[in-house]
Image (cartoon, rainbow, N blue to C red):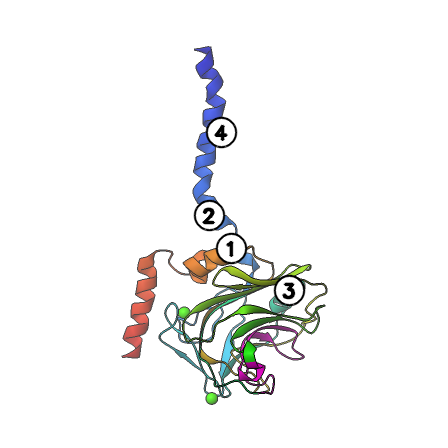
């Protein structure tokens, strides 16, 4: 009998361990670190993060069906973009940052020789190019379609990867910075990383999605599930956001696949 009694604390610990397991799968990402979440499923650029970083559609940009989930930001590659006013919550990303987005970007044309006005901007603290997630356009020659991240405030400022994403199919992009390393992820895998120092120097700037206020770098295609965090997320977190959706992971929309279907069906019905 004594042997059995000795096992009890071990059994109790095992039970406790198992009971905590289901909680851990969603515990990695703290929803309070999401300072802007734009899902586009309400037909506008409203911020689902609770920080009030609602955006405005500019120059004919639309929210349309056909998104990765539900509706998405639809951009004409000419002058469309969405604008979010400066805020203290956006400023809180100045030292550590994650930006994520699903993109369905079209090739704009054949390579030509002048950088960079025909790039596809995805997320930009654009004034002075202080924090950007960008897809190269035809002006980048053989680098067209590659993903660039960085800021004029960082050293080195810029980093672009190897993979191309301008093939009119959905790709998940992420940019993280932890104060020491810049990382570009494509479809949940590291595309490129680089030792980096400095801050973004992006205080008091508006954020532009899918283009910029000075009519440069207008994206051509769809962008969905844009998220900005004031912490550097780990690769596993990026993959969770990619696979399960920003809204589900952050507890903003139903977790079940049925919930996603409902959202998609609502978008279909709305477009009739
Ligand atoms: Ca337009
Ligand atoms: Ca959506």
**Residue range corresponding to the magenta coloring:** 113-141
Crowdedness of circle 1 by 10 Å Cα count: few (<14), some, many (20+)?
Answer: some
Between disc 1 and disc 3, the foreground one is: 1
Q: Mark 4 or 3 closer to N-term?
A: 4
Residue linked to disc 2 = 25
Q: Nearer the viewer, residue 54 or 236?
A: 236
Q: Which residue is mark 1?
A: 237
Indicate yes or no whether the magenta region holds residue 136.
yes
Q: Residue at x 65, y 77 (%)?
A: 129
Find disc 3 in the rendering and name its residue: 92
* Observer able to see residue 269: yes
Question: Label 1 vs label 2: CA separation?
Answer: 10 Å
Vertical placement of residue 127 versus 47, above or below? below
Q: Are marks 4 and 3 in contact (CB under 8 Å)?
A: no
Quarter of the image that includes the N terminus: top left
**Mark 2, secondary structure of its residue:** helix
Label 1 to label 3: alpha-carbon separation: 20 Å
């Amino acid at each position: 009998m004594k042997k059995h009694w000795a096992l009890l604390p071990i059994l109790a610990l095992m039970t406790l361990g198992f009971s905590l397991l289901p909680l851990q799968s969603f515990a990695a990402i703290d929803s309070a670190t999401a300072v802007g979440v734009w899902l586009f499923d309400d037909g506008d650029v409203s911020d689902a993060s609770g920080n009030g970083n609602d955006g405005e559609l500019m120059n004919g940009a639309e929210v349309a069906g056909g998104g990765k989930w539900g509706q998405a930001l639809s951009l004409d590659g000419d002058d469309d973009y969405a604008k979010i006013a400066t805020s203290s919550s956006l400023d809180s990303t100045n030292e550590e940052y994650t930006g994520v987005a699903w993109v369905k970007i079209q090739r704009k044309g054949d390579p030509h020789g002048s950088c960079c006005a025909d790039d596809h901007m995805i997320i930009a603290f654009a004034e002075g190019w202080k924090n950007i997630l960008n897809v190269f356009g035809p002006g980048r020659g053989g680098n067209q379609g590659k993903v660039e991240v960085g800021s004029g405030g960082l050293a080195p400022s810029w980093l672009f990867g190897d993979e191309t994403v301008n093939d009119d199919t959905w790709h998940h992009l992420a940019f993280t910075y932890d104060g020491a390393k810049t990382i570009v992820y494509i479809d949940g895998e590291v595309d490129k990383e680089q030792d980096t120092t400095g801050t973004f120097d992006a205080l008091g700037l508006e954020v532009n999605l899918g283009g910029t206020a000075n009519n440069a770098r207008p994206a051509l295609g769809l962008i969905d599930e844009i998220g900005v965090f004031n912490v550097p997320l780990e690769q596993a977190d990026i993959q969770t956001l990619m696979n399960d959706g920003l809204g589900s992971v952050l507890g903003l929309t139903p977790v079940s696949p049925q919930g996603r279907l409902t959202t998609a069906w609502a978008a279909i019905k709305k477009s009739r």
